[in-house]
Image: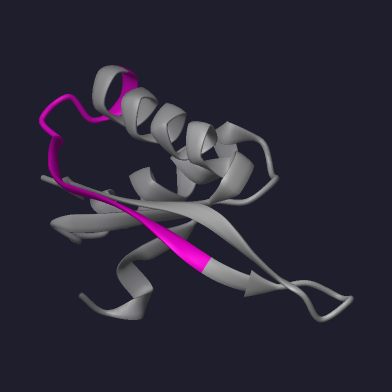
Amino acid sequence: MSEENVVYIGTKPVMNYVLAVVTQMNSGTSEVMLKARGRAISRAVDVAEIVRNKFILDVELGSIAISTEEVSNREGSNSNVSAIEIQLNK
């Protein structure tokens, strides 16, 4: 999957990410990958469900992958952060 078909979920409002997914789907992209880490995981799930249930009704869930990533903080110590990837297919 190319990098342009990936939506990274962060701290912006949910509808910003929904708009990004809907825009990509309407421009002809058949699959979009949502990626989130940590506290943004619940926001990624919200984006996927809003797109499926309110905007593009024929979108289906593809693969869902969960993982743990090791991230170094400002002090130099490492911590584990949960991550999720949700694939949406049209």
Q: Give the range drawn in magenta.
A: 54-69
| Residue positioned 26% across, 56% down in the render | 32
| Residue positioned 17% across, 24% down in the render | 57
| Residue positioned 27% across, 18% down in the render | 53
Pick the residue in front: 45 or 4: 45
| Residue positioned 77% across, 75% down in the render | 77
Q: Relative to 38, does residue 46 appear above or below in the rendering?
A: above
Q: Indicate the position of residue 35 as horizontal and vertical percent values.
A: 42, 56
Magenta region's main secondary structure? strand
Q: Relative to 54, does residue 34 appear above or below in the rendering?
A: below
Pick the residue in front: 36 or 82: 82
Instruction: Looking at this view, name the residue that lies furthest to the front.
Output: 77
Does residue 53 show up magenta in the picture? no
Quadrant placement of the C terminus: top left
Q: Which colour scheme is used?
A: one colour
Does residue 55 show up magenta in the picture? yes
Q: Indicate the position of residue 83 as horizontal and vertical percent values.
A: 44, 54
Q: In which quarter of the image is residue 15?
A: top right
Q: Is residue 47 left or right of residue 65?
A: right
Q: Relative to 16, does residue 32 appear above or below in the rendering?
A: below
Quadrant placement of the N terminus: bottom left
Instruction: Looking at this view, name the residue that lies furthest to the right.
Output: 75
Q: In which quarter of the image is residue 79?
A: bottom right
